[in-house]
Image (cartoon, helix red, strand yellow):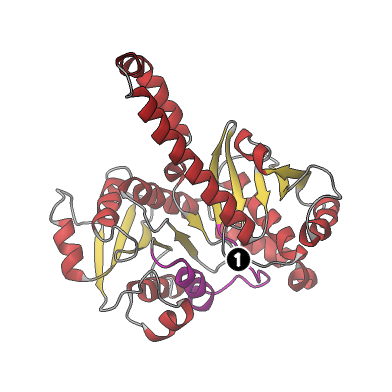
Amino acid sequence: MSEMIRIAVDAMGGDHAPAAIIDGCVQALSIRNDIQLIFVGDEKQIGEELDKHSCSREHIRIIHTSETIGMAEHPVNAIRTKKDSSLVVGMKLVKNKEADCFMSAGNSGAVLVGGQLIVGRIRGITRPPFASLIPTEKGVSLLLDCGANVDARPEHLLSFARIGSIYMENVMGVANPSVGIVNIGAEEEKGNALVKDTFPLLREDGVIRFIGSVEARDIPFGGCDVLVCEGFTGNVVLKMYEGTASMLLKNIKKSLMSSLMGKIGGLLIKPSLKGLLTTFDASQYGGAPLLGLNGLVVKMHGSSKAQEVKNTVIQCADFTERKINDKIQAYAQSLKGDADNIS
């Protein structure tokens, strides 16, 4: 058997923890037998949830913690004061090489702060971005940053573009991925100061394949493989994307159930509709990795249910297998003297 992939799981983070977290992780164990799950959190609660599942505990380990960081807590204060929280202890496992990766649906700010202060940044990467795969007509695009850096400089966006290209090529198998900058128009002169200053850096870079600006309306149609922006814009795009998909699904169901003919039609198209809706379900791609750290940290939605948790476990295993962190580290080292300038 190949070497086990050790995945530390924040069992207490998220709106539906620990039940949904345990459920999703157990489902993942039935898919891959080369992972070890290290549940970090209240041992009693974790044990009670595991007892609800008929699964072997051979690949499960529990580390008890006495504290939990709430969703509304101040990130820096929480990381500094709650040393025995599931989030802090889980990240320390990655820092100390006792786990290959850490996943959490908990406090986003605490994940960001903890990732940088505890796990630490790769030398040369000063602004690790949250990167999220979003479904498109052509497959998926990688959107970064999705909220880690609400303010950024042009050189940071260039770094995001390069890191995103590495991810798409090595995780998603996209050869020579295209890169676009999220903008309010296709013309180079459009946009705010950040976009205007970043555009020439992306255009003149010899590492990425830059195709220019991408408007928000083009994103669902697969305008490019890697979408670059600062965290404020990225988070707005991501949340609007998710909200629109949810609204459409709700209204399609409502329309089909509003009449007898609609119900009959719904039965006829159900298989095709189910496949279509699955394609545009972002949760199937797992969480958003914080790229550029010394270890893998993945943030799931706070409202994550078992499906997203399961897919995030698989995502963590794939990410670790393909040594994406090593590739990003090699990129950072290749910058040499320019590392601080473009990261």
Residue farthest toward the bottom in the current orientation of the protein: 81
Mark 1 neighbour density, 10 Å: few (under 14) some (14–19) many (20 or more): many
Q: Nearer the viewer, residue 232 or 272?
A: 232
Identity of the residue drawn at 49% across and 52% down: 319
Q: Position of residue 223 (x, y in %)?
A: 68, 37
Within the magenta stretch, is there residue 111? Answer: yes
Residue 67, placed above or below residue 127: below
Residue 244, placed above or below residue 207: above
Determine which quarter of the picture holds residue 187: top right
Identity of the residue drawn at 55% across and 50% down: 238
Within the magenta stretch, is there residue 115? Answer: yes
Identity of the residue drawn at 39% across and 25% down: 255
Residue farthest toward the front in the current orientation of the protein: 259
| Quadrant including the C terminus | bottom right
Q: Position of residue 142 (x, y in %)?
A: 59, 47
**Residue position marked by numbered label 1 in the rendering:** 128
Q: Position of residue 221 (x, y in %)?
A: 63, 33
Residue 152, placed above or below residue 32: below
Residue 248, placed above or below residue 201: above
Q: Is residue 247 left or right of residue 257?
A: right
Q: Nearer the viewer, residue 214 or 207?
A: 214
Q: Position of residue 156 (x, y in %)?
A: 71, 64
Determine which quarter of the picture holds residue 105: bottom left
Numbered marks: total: 1
Identity of the residue drawn at 33% across and 13% down: 261
- Which structural element holds mark 1? loop
Q: Is residue 271 left or right of residue 53?
A: right
- The amino acid type of the residue labelled 1 equals Pro
**Magenta residues?**
106-130
